[in-house]
Amino acid sequence: MKIGFISDLHIDYLKSYSPEDMVEELALISSEKELNYLIIGGDISNNMQTTINFIEILDKELTPTKVYFIPGNHDYWQEHNEEKSTWEFHKIFMDHPQSLMRQPLIINDELAIVGHMAWYNHAYYQRDKFTPEQIEAGRYKIATWQDKKRMSWELPDEEVSIIFKEAIIKHLEQMDGRQIVLVTHMVTTPDFTIPMPHRAFDFFNAYIATNDLDGILRKYPVSHSVMGHVHIRHRLHKDNITWVTNSLAYEKEWRTESIRQEIEHAMYILETEK
């Protein structure tokens, strides 16, 4: 049994390639790697319908690989004339049959995948430099966190993080002792935030991670925490958990010009017994 994980495809930021190229390469790699499942960890596009269309097309192309996803913050972004609210977008993602937020994926009697976007709670930033009010507003001098312009939960970020934590706990409690791979879009460990001091991330680290899941990860049999959002690729083993960031990221951030090489480098593959 092979499960591939990748995040942050950002198909509408591609310059040298098209979304169709992304589908083709993911299908080819999934076939060559003999993946049974492909899990996409959010930030597929900047538009809800574009994201859903992409997931559904990809699922048809990746036969027999089965495709599941969680949304990221970009997938909730709204145009100025959007009539739906962020919570309405959330319900659409929750109800989608390929969404891990709808229900966990039971691999077998030993393993399950629990997935949720989670949300940042301002746990990490340079506190002697910015006020909580500035962080909640998402603006400081010329810097603006785009979520504050293009979506609104109508609640403070810390409250959203707690609401989503409770949703994650509800699914964790259904796993009947199975080993769990937790897939979130938001970062779950300070090891994967950007080291400070930093010209931008002294401020922007506030919107990268949550620490609301710290105790949760250790209370339940979580073997892996796989996350996206921060555009780095790294693996770390600590506290009996393997922590993985697997963002494909913006094309301008790639190390090579090859979409295939970048996908292969970003993708994390977990092998397990059937």
Image: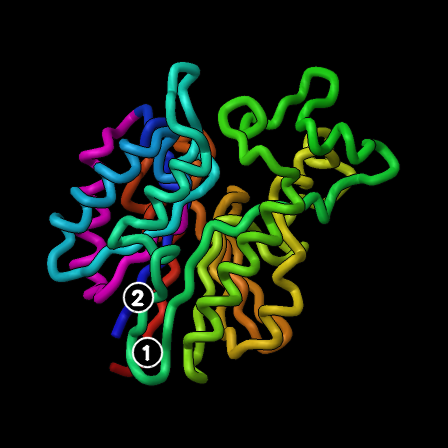
Q: Which residue is mark 1?
A: 272
Give the colour scheme shown.
rainbow
Quadrant for the C terminus in the image: bottom left
- Find out whether residue 20 is within the magenta segment: yes
Q: Is residue 151 left or right of residue 34?
A: right
Q: Is residue 61 left or right of residue 166?
A: left
Q: Position of residue 93 (x, y in %)?
A: 35, 45
Q: Position of residue 99 (x, y in %)?
A: 32, 53
Quadrant for the N terminus in the image: bottom left
Q: Are marks 2 and 1 in contact (CB under 8 Å)?
A: yes
Q: Position of residue 7 (x, y in %)?
A: 40, 48
Q: Which mark is residue 247?
A: none
Q: Which residue is mark 2?
A: 3
Q: Nearer the viewer, residue 129 or 78?
A: 78
Count residues near mark 1 (Cα–Cα under 10 Å), then give few for <14, some for 14-19, many for 20+: few
Q: Is residue 124 visible in the rendered structure shown here?
A: yes
Say whether disc 2 or disc 1 marks the residue closer to the N-terminus: 2
Q: Nearer the viewer, residue 61 or 82?
A: 82
Q: Nearer the viewer, residue 252 or 164?
A: 164
What residue is shown at x 62% (from left), y 72% (from top)? 238
